[in-house]
Amino acid sequence: MRNLPDYDAPPVIETVLAVEFAALERWEIPHFGLFWHNIQSYYPRYEVNAPLISEIERPRLEFRPPQVPRVEVLSKPQVRCWFLNEANTELIQIQDDRFVHNWRKVVGTEPYPHYEDHIRPTFERDWQEFCDFLASEKLGAPDVRQCDVTYVNHIDRGKGWETMADLPKLFPCWAGASSGNFLPPPESALFNVSYLMPEDRGRLRIALVHAFRSSDATETLQLTLTARGKPESSASSDILEWLDLGREWVVRGFTDFTSERMHQVWRRRI
Amino acid sequence: MASAAVFSRQIPEMEEPATNSQLSGVVLLYHATSALLISLRRIGELKRLPDDWDSYGSPRIQQLAAQRAVQVLSAAAMEGVRPPQIVPVSGGGLQIEWTSANRELEIEILPDGSIEYLIVEAEQTYEGPMPAEHADLFVQGLVRWLTGTNAYAGPIR
């Protein structure tokens, strides 16, 4: 049952559910192909990419000295594989410390398949398949370090805003005011905000960038909400519990961060 | 399927994301020049032209052409050039034109995303195809020629 804010026409163009775990020491290149064999009916296509870096959230913001460049000698090639469905709208990404499920718009007209109806069950099915594979190949159970829920939204120009002077109409936190009258309206904007989730459950990050989408030549505001945190344990039930929490923070955070005027544009139901 | 077949080809078909997100194909505008912003908005306007916009049955601007035009304009913006004239071309393509005191540069994006260019100086002209995979370097070389005084020596001839 849906009890979170819900929209008929949400601006979401991509969702991400991800699990980061301690690198699987016995994971080798052939395991990508062996695992693909198990999921090929869902994901018949693939791509090979460079691995994602680790971005573990700390419970509190910390001073970290600048990283000194270092050279690492890799004992085996670092690879990330994408396994994609036929329409390219869903993929899972595997590397030796990561499992990621993405849904995204490709054509632009695909309806958002709701979290409860499709995204969560699909993640749960694929994650279980992955864990079963690790067990069958005696690669060990994932020691989970962090879960990640990301929603990427595109608020297109002409759908609630025309210039940056309209930002206060979109985001209540942006008053658009100034102490005097020297500055003209902003030409562009970029901001990052973070919020701690209670009881050290994680952190929600909200990032806004002014962008131009090449695929359909549309100017847009890209609003990305990312919740990250560590589940109680590496059990699938705890991972799903954290993803539900992260998703709740993303959805409630999105609704709090955006204006009621925009909620009408996106046809809020609940 | 045998696992050896998994790595039989490595052709990236989608652009690389910055994070776990697979989001692709956006040009960040925070650091964009006003010339680039003006040009991108012009592409956006032209992309909204309907089929038969020229009354001669031309299809609308094709997505590949618009995407390639964004690539060309972003590369040109790196050279600090002023906004070009951008016009639609029958068939669903786009033409991007710059002129300076005695030089002209025209870049035509065909509906399938392929690129051709024409340079004019006095009575001399030179035209040719531009390999899309090297378009950034190529465009920057052409813009430097347009705004400079040296003879054209493109990165790839």
Image (cartoon, rainbow, N blue to C red):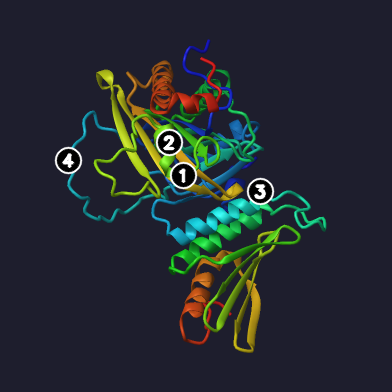
The correct choice, above or below, for B136 with respect to A104 in the image is below
Query: Which residue is painted at 58% across and 75% down in the image?
Result: B105
Q: Nearer the viewer, mark 4 or mark 3?
A: 3
Which amino acid is tagged 4?
Phe
Residue at mark 4 to residue at mark 3: CA–CA distance: 48 Å
Could you tell which of marks 4 and 1 lies nearer the N-terminus? 4
Tags 4 and 1 in contact by the CB under 8 Å rule?
no
Q: Quarter-wise, where is residue A178 in the image?
A: top left
Which amino acid is tagged 1?
Thr
Residues at marks 4 and 2 on the same chain: yes
Q: Which mark is residue A163?
A: 1
Query: Which residue is painted at 59% across and 48% down in the image?
Result: A215
Q: Would residue A146 be seen by someone viewing this image from the given angle?
A: no
Q: Which one is in front, A251 or A221?
A: A221
Position of the C terminus of chain B by quadrant: bottom right
The residue at which mark 4 appears reads as A63
Q: Which one is in front, B100 or A203?
A: B100
Residues at marks 4 and 3 on the same chain: no
Position of the N terminus of chain B by quadrant: top right
Q: Secondary structure at mark 3?
A: loop
Q: Is residue B110 left or right of residue A226?
A: right
Q: Chain of mark 2?
A: A
Could you tell which of marks 4 and 2 lies nearer the N-terminus? 4
The residue at which mark 2 appears reads as A224
Q: How many marks?
A: 4
Q: Position of residue A270 (x, y in %)?
A: 51, 14
Which amino acid is tagged 3?
Arg
Q: Is residue A84 left or right of residue B16?
A: right
Pointer 1: residues within 10 angstroms few (<14), some, or many (20+)? Answer: few
Q: Secondary structure at mark 1?
A: loop
Q: Nearer the viewer, mark 2 or mark 1?
A: 1
Which amino acid is tagged 2?
Thr
